[in-house]
Image (cartoon, rainbow, N blue to C red):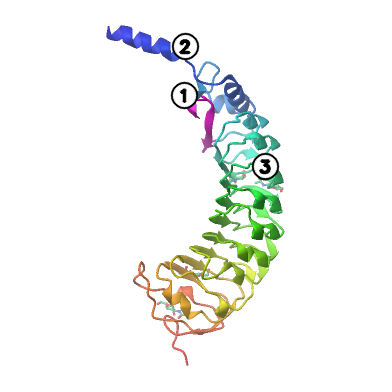
Amino acid sequence: MFHFLLFLLSTVGTSAERCHPDDKAAILKFKNSFSNGPQLLPMWTSDRDCCDIFDCDQTTNRITDFSITYSDLAGTIPDAVGDLTYLQTLRLHKMPFLVGEIPRSVTRLKHVTFFDISWTNISGHVPPFLAELKSVMFIYLSYNNLSGPIPPSLATLPNMIGLDLSRNQLTGSIPESFGHLVSPALQGLSLSHNKLSGEIPTTVGNMKIYQIDVSRNSLSGDASMLFGASKGSSVIDISRNNFEFDFSQVSFMEDTLVTLDISHNNIYGKIPSQILKAFMLQFLNVSYNRLCGEIPSPWQLKYRSEGFDNSSFIHNRCLCGSPLAQCK
Ligand SMILES: *[C@@H]1O[C@H](CO)[C@@H](O)[C@H](O)[C@H]1NC(C)=O
Ligand SMILES: *[C@@H]1O[C@H](CO)[C@@H](O)[C@H](O)[C@H]1NC(C)=O
Ligand SMILES: *[C@@H]1O[C@H](CO)[C@@H](O)[C@H](O)[C@H]1NC(C)=O
Ligand SMILES: *[C@@H]1O[C@H](CO)[C@@H](O)[C@H](O)[C@H]1NC(C)=O
């Protein structure tokens, strides 16, 4: 009886393959486009149900999540990824031998919400056609070899929550369009570790954004528009640029600020005493600037009993007071 049941289950299993033929064709094309694909992906075969390998939607039986991580697949991203038209997640992560450009075929992924190609060696520009991915909420393209400017069109993505273009070779300035984002919900923007230059457009001050990281670029001029008591910022990292503005005038949202790093710029003026009320603050670094005056105290830090040591304040023009030397 037991054996009979097993037999029955296994026949039901094989006769009811869920995989859609278009998806099966796409993943086989994907595999075979890499010189080492057949060797590294021996399980992807035509007699295997692709819904056993990938997440498929319960009703449509279409692949919704195509994630490949920590893989030595060598070659370019094949056009066939664009044939997986029901994808919600595309993730190609930690693939050091993935090279070439992002193919235009990805614009066929009309349902994609999570678009992640990170820690690879893809190159070329951040393609402006990514703005055609109207469902996308997260674009992660960090740790690649992308160059050229940030496409202004990315600001038109209506549902974008997070954009991470950090650790590439991007040049040019932050587009003016980022001051007129269509998405009401952008929470995180990371452009760090690139070669961005020029001044931040003043309109970018319109952005209400939870986490912003533009560190390690060559940006210059004023960055005070990124601050403000009404912005709800949690992380502001503008370190290692050439910013030059008066820090005395900036304000913070006291209830939300957790990380503030302005180190290694040419920022002048005083540390505003309002910072003392940022009781969530856990990381502060204003070192290597041209600040002056007394370091405000006492701190009212709720989640960091010990305050900040002198490395947070060193190498300024004339900052003084604890934890640096007493003011004269
Ligand atoms: C890109 O390729 C270089 C040289 O092969 C390698 O050292 C590096 O780790 C690769 N980058 C990533 C992010 O995998
Ligand atoms: C990164 O891209 C540049 C061209 O933009 C190329 O010369 C360089 O070899 C690439 N680096 C790697 C590790 O692929
Ligand atoms: C602040 O930044 C400086 C310069 O990069 C560094 O030496 C110091 O350790 C940092 N301090 C903290 C608390 O991160
Ligand atoms: C910072 O503190 C360390 C150890 O407490 C001390 O050795 C150093 O001299 C101080 N540096 C400055 C600039 O106050």
Q: Residues within 10 Å of mark 3 (few under 14, many from 20)?
A: some
Asked if marks 2 and 3 touch (Cβ < 8 Å), the reply is no
What's drawn in magenta, residue-wise?
A: 53-71
Is residue 311 rendered to the left or right of residue 172? left
Asked if marks 2 and 1 touch (Cβ < 8 Å), the reply is no
In front of the other: label 2 or label 1? 2
Asked if marks 3 and 1 touch (Cβ < 8 Å), the reply is no
The reply to whether the residue tagged 3 has its Cβ within 8 angstroms of ligand 2 is no
In front of the other: label 3 or label 1? 3
Disc 1 residue type?
A: Asp
Residue 40 placed where, x, y %?
54, 28
The residue depicted at 67 percent of the width and 42 percent of the height is 132
Task: Give me the C-alpha separation between circle 3 and circle 1.
Answer: 30 Å
Disc 2 residue type?
A: Ser
Please, what secondary structure does the residue beneath circle 2 have? helix
- Give the residue pinned by disc 3: 132
The residue depicted at 62 percent of the width and 36 percent of the height is 110
In front of the other: label 2 or label 3? 3
Q: Earlier in the sequence, mark 3 or mark 1?
A: 1
Please give the label number shown on residue 52: 1
Task: Please name whichever residue, 247 or 167, is drawn nearer the observer in this view of the structure.
Answer: 247
- Give the residue pinned by disc 2: 15
Q: Eyeballing the image, is 298 above or below 252?
A: below
Q: Eyeballing the image, is 220 above or below 101?
A: below
Please, what secondary structure does the residue beneath circle 3 have? helix
Task: Please name whichever residue, 274 or 116, is drawn nearer the observer in this view of the structure.
Answer: 274
